[in-house]
Amino acid sequence: MTTILLLSADTGGGHQAAAQAIACELRGQGFLPEQIVIVDTFNRCRRWPFYRLGAVHRWAVSTRPGRLLHTLMFWWDQEPRSRGLADAFCHWGMAPLFAELEQLYPQAVWVTLHPFITQAVGRWKLRTSPSLRMATVVTELAFAPWACFHPAADLCCVANQQVAQQALRVGVAPHKLRVTGLPLKPGFSQPPPCAMACRQKLGLARQTPTILLISGGEGFAGSIVDLCRELDQRLASKAQLLVVTGYNADLRRQLEQQTWRGSVSIRGFVENMETCIGAADLVLTKSGPGTLSEVLAVGRPMILFAHLPGPERRNVDYLVSQGAALFLPRQADLARGVLELVADPPRLDAMRRCAQLLSESGSAARVGAGIRELAT
Ligand code: UDP
């Protein structure tokens, strides 16, 4: 029996969301639940610092010195000599886990969802296990770092033609490359939902224009709490605000302690992101590829207010140049931008149409089909 190992990571929510989307899709395609294993790769490593990478990532995206580290890592990726060293280190850190996985699941297809894991598995395949079947799912939207690709992979799934061109430039063989879109959870494969029905499901006022703020907020020149207060003051009677704080429990607590003038609904980590996005007329978010792809799939206009150094910066350029988003990293501009857009429905409509043009429906099914072919 072939097992599908989805080698994911808890560095941000995007890799995990993609792994879950692929797992759902494979179950839908007839794989048994026991054939699909999501591996929390870094947390299962026993070698330092790999089992700490989740915490390092959280530090790296939320503090100034951490962001410097993030920038350095991106620089590492661009430099061939430093790349070799770092990849050897990743392989050293993960090799004992790979040996264990090969023993547990001898007939497996290995699907990598994170650049460090892609490099480590590629090296493992070349050096130790040449018959291993390997697929790579690149979870980037507009630009993928070099480390997302490995020549040893038998299949490489990318979000769009732009990333496919990068893959070809770094030597991925054309016959291994598939433009699939980023795999999104099943809720996103339905036609765009009706905003009023989504608001009702969420217990929000059906008829009131709705702004969704998906926090994150790293690199945003302002505080999310202050921004919400300002939007609340200015929007009070014109729109309602739905705030999703995700993994950020501190932010949720701070927001819940505020007194609001208008309607502000605070949610922590939500499992029904498609309904939250569907309820919105306008989405405010940082520039993570997973969230952006989900907002495009639902077809909602966006204001981006932050990005991490590296690929997220390119996501901003991509969406702004395509007319689907505005980039307003300063709190004062952001609040003003929201008010102007809410007061300008034709402009919101034009942005919504641009977002719909960029959406990739059926992406998880295409990724699932590729993995299935490798498995048979
Ligand atoms: N997410 C979620 N519930 C939340 C907050 C986030 O399901 O409350 C998901 C979101 O829908 C997306 C992922 O987490 O699929 C975040 O991925 P992204 O690539 O945008 O950012 P990352 O966290 O990887 O930097």
Image (cartoon, grey):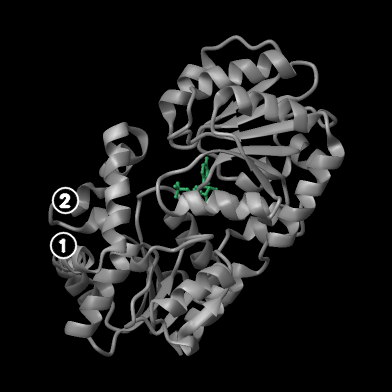
Mark 2 residue crowding within 10 angstroms, few (<14) / some (14–19) / many (20+): few
Residue nearest the viewer, comparing 154 with 270: 154
Is residue 209 visible in the rendered structure shown here? no
| Rendering coords of residue 242 (x, y %) | 65, 30
Q: Is residue 302 left or right of residue 18?
A: right
Disc ID at residue 167: none
The residue at 65%/69% (across/down) is: 362
Q: Position of residue 84 (x, y in %)?
A: 19, 69
Image quadrant holding the N terminus, namely bottom left
Compute the Cα span from label 1 to label 2. 8 Å
17 with respect to 154 (left or right): right
Q: Is residue 82 above or below residue 203?
A: below
Q: Nearer the viewer, residue 250 or 145?
A: 145
In this orientation, which residue lies closer to the viewer: 253 or 53?
A: 53
Q: Which residue is mark 2?
A: 49
| Image quadrant in which you'd find residue 276 | top right
Q: Is mark 1 in CB contact (under 8 Å) with mark 2?
A: yes
Looking at the picture, tell me which residue is in the foreground, 136 or 147: 147
What number is the disc on residue 93? 1
